[in-house]
Amino acid sequence: MFEKLIYLDNNATTKVDDKVLEAMLPYFTTLYGNAASYEHSFGRYSKKGIENARSQVAELIGAHPNEIFFTSGATESINLAIKGIALANKKKGNHIITVNTEHTAILDTCKYLTRNGFSVSLLNVNQQGEIDLEELKNLIRDDTIIVTAMHANNETGVIHPLEEISKIVKQTRNIYFITDATAAVGKVHINVKKIAIDALILSGHKIYGPKGVGALYLNRSNHYMEAVPQIHGGGHEHGYRSGTLNVPGIIGLGKACEILISQMDEEQSRIGNLRNLLENKLNVLDGVSINGLGNRLNNVANICFTNVDNQTLMLSLPNVAASSGSACTSSLKNKSHVLKAMGLTDVQISSSIRFSLGRFNTKLEIDYVGDTLLFNIKRLREKFKYSIQ
C-alpha cells in the first residue's frame, strides 16, 4: 500500500523540478531587481537573466530569441495571439477557423470575437479525435485570416498534423497559422520555422516550471505579422505585453526548457513505456477502451471503463491523482467537450478517466495503480451488478 500520493495528473500541472527551483531562488532574494531598471546592477542582472531565458525558450522550439514574448501563462498568450492578430488584420478579413476539441481558452476567445464582428468555423474530429484535412481546405475562404489548431490535445494526447495543416494554410495565401502547443511542448519536437507557424503558445507549469508564467512565439520573419496588444501600460516586451516581468518565473521557465533540450527523448521514451504498462494491465478487462488511440503523446492514457462511474472509481483510489477532464474547465458542470466531439455518449464520458504521466513517476507506482484499478473496477461492477455485453 502506497502511503504517499501517486500523481498522474501532469497535463493539469507538473511539479517544479528541483533544478528549476534552484535557478529561480536567487531572483527572489539577492537578484531581485526589476528587469526594466537598466540604470543599476540589480536591474541589469535581472535583464540578463530574462534574455538568457528568452534564448532557452527559443532554442526549444527553433525560434529566434527576439520572437519570444513572456506572459502570465498560456491563457494570456492565447488571447494575445488570437485577439491581437485578428484585430490587427480585420481589414483583410474576419474569418477564423479552429477545431471543436480545442482548449476552452481558444474556443472562448473565438466566441468573444464572434460578438465583435468576426466569423468562426469549427473543424470536426473523428472518433479518434483527428481532423479531416479536406474539411480544412473546404472551410478556407477569401476572408479567412487565422487558422488555429492545438499541437496535441490536453485531454486525449491526440497529435494534430501541424506540417500538413501549415501547408494547406500557406499554399492559399498569407493566413496566420496559430498553434496552442501547451500540452505538446517538452513531449514532442517542435520547430516553428520548419512547420511555418506564425504564433505558438506554451506555459511553464506544464513542463516542470512554475505557474503564472508562459511565452508566446510570434513569427517576426513574417513581414505581415501584426498583433494588437491586449495589455497596455509601459510598452514592455516590445510593446506586445505591458507589465512588470515575473523575473523568477521567467528564469524558471527558461531553465525548464533547458532541461528538456538535453533529456526530452530519453524521458519521453521512459514515460511512454510506463503509459503502455498501465494500459496493458487494464486491457485484460472487458469493457476497457482508449479514447483517442492513434498518434498521441506518450504520457496520456484517456480510458473509458464501461459500466463504472469515473467519480466513484477515483474515490476508490484516494491516494491516486488523476482527472475526469481538463483542469481548466473543472468549475463547469458540462461534460468533456473533447470526448463529446469524438462521439462518446454522456454515459461513456462519465466512465472515462485521464491518466497523464510525468517525469517523476516510477514503475512501482504504475504497477500499484494498475493493480488497484483492476481490483476496484471488478468490485464496483459486481457491487452494482453490471456485466459487459
Image: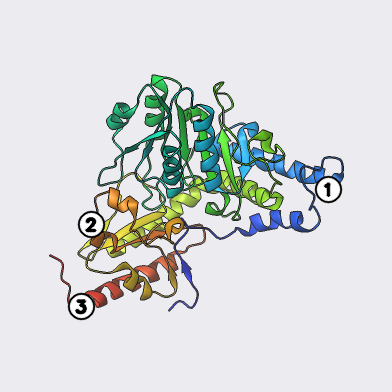
Circle 1 Cα neighbour tier, 10 Å, few/some/many (<14 / 14–19 / ≥20): some
The answer to whether residue 123 is left or right of residue 62 is left
Dividing the picture into quarters, in which one does residue 111 lie?
Answer: top left
Q: Amino acid at mark 1?
A: Phe
Q: Answer above or below: position of 389 versus 124.
A: below
- Which circle's residue, 1 or 2, is located before the other in the chain? 1
Which of disc 1 and disc 3 is earlier in sequence?
Answer: 1
Q: Residue type at mark 3?
A: Glu
Numbered tag placed on residue 345 in the rendering:
2
Please tell me which residue is depicted at 30% across the width and 50% down the height of the picture: 292
Horizontal side, residue 42 vs residue 187: left or right: right
In what element is the residue under mark 1?
Answer: helix
Displayed quadrant of residue 306: bottom left
The disc label shown at residue 382, or none: 3
Q: Report the residue marked by disc 1.
A: 42
Residues at circles 2 and 3 in contact by the CB criterion of under 8 Å: no
Tell me if mark 2 has few (under 14), some (14-19) or many (20+) residues whose alpha carbon lies within 10 angstroms of its own: few
Callout in the foreground (1, 2) = 2
SS of the residue at dot 2?
loop
Q: Is residue 110 left or right of residue 292?
A: right
Q: Give percent across and percent down for residue 209.
A: 59, 54
Query: How far apart are the alpha carbons under marks 2 and 3?
Result: 23 Å
Q: Residue at x 30, y 53 (%)?
A: 339
Model colouring: rainbow
For discs 2 and 3, the disc positioned in front in the rendered view: 2
Q: Report the residue at 66% width, 58% height from top.
A: 21
Amino acid type of the residue that numbered disc 2 sits on in the rendered structure: Thr
On the image, the x and y values in percent for residue 251 come to 68, 49
> Which tag, 2 or 3, sits closer to the chain's start?
2
Question: Residue at (47%, 57%) from the top-left corner?
Answer: 12
Query: Does dot 3 land on a helix, a strand or a loop?
Result: helix
What's the CA distance linking mark 3 and mark 1?
Answer: 65 Å
